[in-house]
Amino acid sequence: MAEIENDIQLLKGNKCIIGVFDDEVGNKHLTVKKDSDEVIYYAFSSEKGLCITTEYGSVRRENLLQEMISLPDGNIGHLFSYIEETGFFLPLASMEDYEISYEAIIDTVRAIKATTLLLSEIAKVNPNYEKILHLTFYLIFGKREGLRLNENVIRQPCEHGVIKILKDTTLLPISNADALEANEKGCYIISDTMHKSAYKLDAGEYADIICGERFSFDYPGIDDKRYKKLIYRYKNRVGLGQNERIVVDFLFHFMHSVGVVKSVSYCDGISYYGKPKMDKMDNNMKAGLLNTARIVTAEEINYNISLISPIYSPRKLEPVWHFPDLLSAYFFSIFYMRPGREMYRKCANPSCGKYFLVKTTNGRKKYCGDNCRNANNQRDHRLREKKKKAKPQA
């Protein structure tokens, strides 16, 4: 077995057992407990990613992050088996059963997947903007549950900066100064990060949205509470940092021009009030999306690695990292991805669907290995032969 680098800090965990049971009214509940006292050793390598190793550093299982993002959505049995083999996200202190939430496990896995795939998509020369939009909005707006063991809240999901801003926003009546500006100019002049010149926000529309009246403007989603607060914070920008302004500006322009977002699901995508006007996603809007996606990705990673700490080992006389749990280690793997140099790409073999690391500049490698490439070539050959036989003879 290959040896992992000597400068990698080891993390310890255990295999676990996930139990499923029904309560008196038929609702499903989950429990998790240590399978045994046998220790799983983890280590991080810049080349092999997060690995399972022996106590002495011999690699037993490479790139757990790649395995995680390759897990098929909707196959709960496959997911639970993977977690049982590789260890639970948080430490399990004893052999007792801990009650856990089904949604919390699914949400945690989806957050890891969304962050990894978003970072990979941003790194592409020709990114898929629809995919970036979906993953970015999922991380911002998607409903995610914190991980709990029994009644204790152990790890809350990342609450992104723009969500904190909107939560803390109270809609105040239009001030006399605002009313005076509106009467004089008919609009509010906003210094906007997406526009070289200032943006003119229609005063009548702003008043209709904030006051909940319909004198001149009425469109799908205009009454959405989140949209109201977004418009308010877009106009009243005092206290916003540079990154917060970038995100608020993009969300305003997107919802104002394309469509107001109702909800976001990892599997079902973005739901809008009314039909979105995707033709409004011009180059300026795409640039705003990329900037927002970068900020959101950084927030997600920074939050989830915040409990990792560097220490200096007196035994090795070298720096090592202390990981509080396996969840932090997964995000540490994302932290050490190299956007612009490598990314995860989905195997083009329809029967595979696994993700694999590839250099960003390599646009030709479409399969995770020779077996998938050969299998897909044979499949295409059979389809061509089938079409030839089905073609009527002249």
Image (cartoon, rainbow, N blue to C red):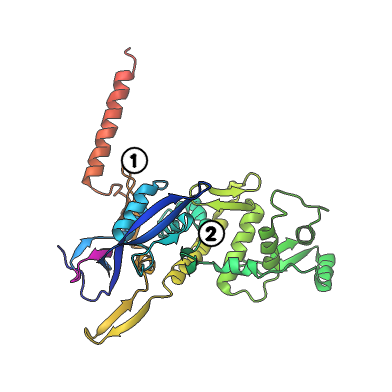
> How packed is label 1: few (under 14 Cα within 10 Å), some, or many (20 or more)?
few
Magenta span: 49-57
Indicate which label's residue lies in the foreground, 1 or 2: 1
Along the line of sight, the residue nearer the viewer: 382 or 109: 109
Please give the name of the residue rendered at 24% of the width and 76% of the height, measured from the top-left corner: 7
Q: Is residue 86 left or right of residue 127?
A: left
Mark with earlier residue (1, 2): 2
Q: Secondary structure at mark 1?
A: loop
* Residue farthest along the left direction in this orientation: 1
Q: Is residue 313 left or right of residue 93?
A: left
**Gap between marks 1 and 2 measured at Cα:** 30 Å
Q: Is residue 378 above or below residue 216?
A: above
Whether residue 194 is visible to the viewer of this picture, yes or no, is: no
Is 242 inside the magenta-drawn segment?
no
Is 50 inside the magenta-drawn segment?
yes
Looking at the rendered structure, the kind of residue marked 2 is Leu
| x, y percent for residue 127 | 44, 54
Mark number for residue 289? 2
Looking at the rendered structure, the kind of residue marked 1 is Pro
Q: Secondary structure at mark 2?
A: helix
Along the line of sight, the residue nearer the viewer: 89 or 24: 24
Q: Which residue is mark 1?
A: 350
Q: Is residue 26 left or right of residue 380?
A: right
| x, y percent for residue 257 | 65, 53
Q: Is residue 291 left or right of residue 364?
A: right
Whether residue 32 is visible to the viewer of this picture, yes or no, is: yes
> How packed is label 2: few (under 14 Cα within 10 Å), some, or many (20 or more)?
many
Determine which quarter of the picture holds residue 49.
bottom left
